[in-house]
Amino acid sequence: MTDRHDPHVHEKILIVDFGSQVTQLIARRVREEGVYCEIIPFQSAEKAYHDINPKAVILSGGPASVLDENAPYVPDLIFKSGVPVLGICYGEQTMAKQLGGHVESGHHREFGRAEIEVTASCKLFEGVWAKGQKSPVWMSHGDRVTRLPQGFSVVAVSENAPFAAIADEARHYYGVQFHPEVVHTPDGAKLIRNFVRNIAGCRADWTMKAFREEAIKRIRDQVGKGRVICGLSGGVDSSVAAVLIHEAIGDQLTCVFVDHGLLRLGEAQKVVTLFRDHYNIPLVHVDASETFLTELSGVEDPETKRKVIGKLFIDVFDAEAKKIGGADFLAQGTLYPDVIESVSFTGGPSVTIKSHHNVGGLPERMKMKLVEPLRELFKDEVRALGRELGLPDAFVGRHPFPGPGLAIRIPGAITKEKADILRLADEIYLEEIRRAGLYDKIWQAFAVLLPVRTVGVMGDGRTYDHVCALRAVTSVDGMTADFYHFDMNFLGRAANRIINEVKGINRVVYDVTSKPPGTIEWE
């Protein structure tokens, strides 16, 4: 357990991470049951076990083979502890091998949708699946278990996995070759619920009301009489962090809101009104749009854009902090997915898809300590906390907005003219989405101004103007996403308004790329 927690506050589940791309989804499923959990890379699992003192352990999937030399493994301590263990995919295989079973490669692989047949009842399936029942699941494995350890029995099979689910009821050990955490296993969440609530016996005491009270105490203990400065972007994370910290320490907090000239229409005013007028939080509003746009002039590479914006944020922030007399702490809206990525056993993603644009360089430069009250939360939990704190739905439910703002929604060089054109198109698009009652069904929607001009006809005149691309995706947490399936009448209506009302756009297209292979943002 981290030093942020009183070990007696919550019963906990330890998730040992073997590098699966969907380990976060296991944690989300556990949290949805009102049970606190932490994801820890396998090398640190033994120490984490001592620190956390979990009620049960879940072993994630992973890309490795248990047959590899130096394959990741579960510390023996966990199997000797007597707590229930659930192994998923690689987790099942390493559990089987470490406890005396046998795993082989070279058999038929299973990737994607599969069907399992329940061959015996067990506590993991109780109230979900009965003997003889067939159910769809999601598989992703090359190796397979071929001999069970002593005490285990087979409870489900699939075409290519004779040990699709195994159980040792006496020791409360369970293994599944499929992934119950993904939506493609329709009953998977119920299985995780059975393990967490019925087998491990955890109470559902992880609530935002409890978190709020604990977080306020932790902030007060950490900050004491010190001053805190918070970089406010206007997004959900920084807004919730600011309101929570203000509730804990009042006027010891000052927020700095930097307008880089690449915000949505009316964004700056909304943020200023909410924090100054509604919450009465000390707020410094800096209009640095000219500085940012001048510095970005002629810059086309998206990575360079992010770095320019990141550096300027630090410069402006540093200058404003000095004006208010400095601060002892810097507050950031860091979330749990950021924490997990930074401690991943592989060191995070092997390829940098995009660099971080936020104020990561500030603490060192300004000699401040970090206050990160949301670092244990997923995005949906942040929204729940925001509602608990009384933030208006307009702020809590808003779609994610990137730190570099419109800079990465204007591929190629940025100008004020282009930003103004895009701002208006984006506002019309979101307005139409809200009118259609679709805003809360979509994870993220936005317009992109393409570096492409096409010929058009308006009245009797010929036009040669920009193309606007519309993007809307559904997602759980942004890790994967699918494009939103709009009715064509909706798209026609939105496109018609944009072309008629936005000078500079004469053609609109809709982006139907999922993630992967694409990203949600265009840059």
Image (cartoon, rainbow, N blue to C red):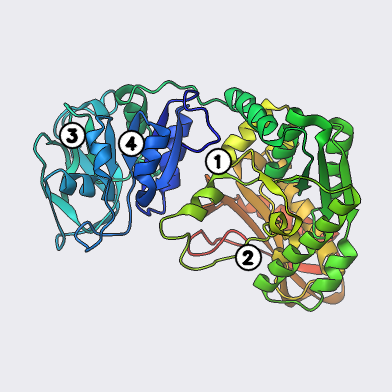
The residue indicated by pointer 3 is 167
Is 505 left or right of 208, judged from the image as shown? right
Secondary element at tag 4: strand
The earlier-in-sequence mark between 3 and 4 is 4
- The kind of secondary structure element at disc 3 is strand
- Vertical placement of residue 250 versus 403, above or below: above
Q: Amino acid at mark 1?
A: Phe
Residue position marked by numbered label 4 in the rendering: 57
Mark 2 sits on what residue? 522
Q: Are marks 1 and 2 in contact (CB under 8 Å)?
A: no
Q: Within 10 angstroms of label 1, few (less than 14), some, or many (20 or more) residues?
A: many
Q: CA distance from mark 1 to mark 2?
A: 24 Å
Q: Which residue, given by chain and number where applicable, does mark 1 sit on?
A: 378
Q: Give neighbour class at mark 2: few <14, some 14-19, many 20+ (Cα, 10 Å).
A: some
Q: CB under 8 Å between callouts 1 and 4?
A: no
Q: At label 4, which amino acid type do we have?
A: Val
Q: Position of residue 114 (x, y in %)?
A: 26, 48
Cα gap from disc 3 to disc 2, whole angstroms? 46 Å
Give the amino acid at mark 3.
Answer: Ala
Q: Going from the N terminus, do you reach mark 1 or mark 3 first?
A: 3
Q: Residue at x 14, y 30 (%)?
A: 120
User: What residue is shown at x 8% (from left), y 38% (from top)?
Assistant: 150
Q: Nearer the viewer, mark 1 or mark 2?
A: 1
Q: Check contact, mark 1 vs mark 3: CB within 8 A.
A: no
